[in-house]
Amino acid sequence: MGRFPKRARKISAIDRELLFREGTVLFHYPYKLFFSLQPAPIKGTEYAIVVAVPKRNVKRAVDRNLIRRRIKESFRTSNSILISTLKEHKLHIQLFCLYLPDEHTASATLCHKMESLLERLAYQVTQSGALSLSRDG
């Protein structure tokens, strides 16, 4: 787990647009998660994530930054199940996490919701990995 590496925070604008157009959406309040799976690169992390807190929902920048930090921390502490699934299937995932409510949510709630969202995501990765294996073999 450890840090939240810089290369895990970088998704190009082109990849972000593809993520919105062709990515899969997973909704688990207070999050809406767009994701896209690719074969794993030889070197690098198993994931790349962008966290967005819309200005329309949370007006003050201080509050948006606080929520963004809390979401990143909850992802960092609960991503082990997702990473092990990605390593097992030799996949890389790009994530765009959108925060939906217009009020503050407690850190414990954010962590709990992120854990259950990542479990659902790992299950979907397992299902898509099984589908790609059955197509190849």
Image (cartoon, rainbow, N blue to C red):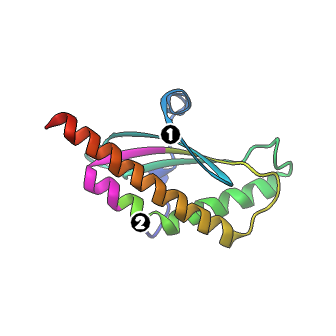
Locate residue 34, reporting x and y percent: 54, 41
Locate the N terminus and report the quarter of the image it occupies. bottom left
Callout 2: few (<14), some (14-19), or many (20+) C-alpha neighbours within 10 Å? some
Residue 60's label in the rendered image is: none
Locate residue 100, reporting x and y percent: 72, 48
| Closest to the observer, 125 or 87 | 125
| Closest to the observer, 67 or 29 | 29
Q: Amino acid at mark 2?
A: Ser
Q: Nearer the viewer, mark 1 or mark 2?
A: 2
Locate residue 134, reporting x and y percent: 20, 39
Callout 1: few (<14), some (14-19), or many (20+) C-alpha neighbours within 10 Å? some
CA–CA distance in space, label 1 to label 2: 21 Å
The correct choice, above or below, for 136 with respect to 31 in the image is above
Secondary structure under the numbered disc 1 in the rendered image: loop
Q: Is residue 49 left or right of residue 67?
A: left
Q: Which residue is disc 1 drawn over?
A: 11
Name the residue at 66% across, 73% down: 108
88 inside magenta stretch: yes
Secondary structure under the numbered disc 2 in the rendered image: helix
Q: Amino acid at mark 1?
A: Ile
Q: Is residue 9 left or right of residue 127?
A: right
Q: Which residue is disc 2 drawn over?
A: 80
Q: Is residue 103 visible?
A: yes
Name the residue at 46% across, 60% down: 119
Locate the C terminus and report the quarter of the image it occupies. top left
Q: Which residues are magenta?
A: 84-94
Locate residue 35, reporting x and y percent: 49, 42
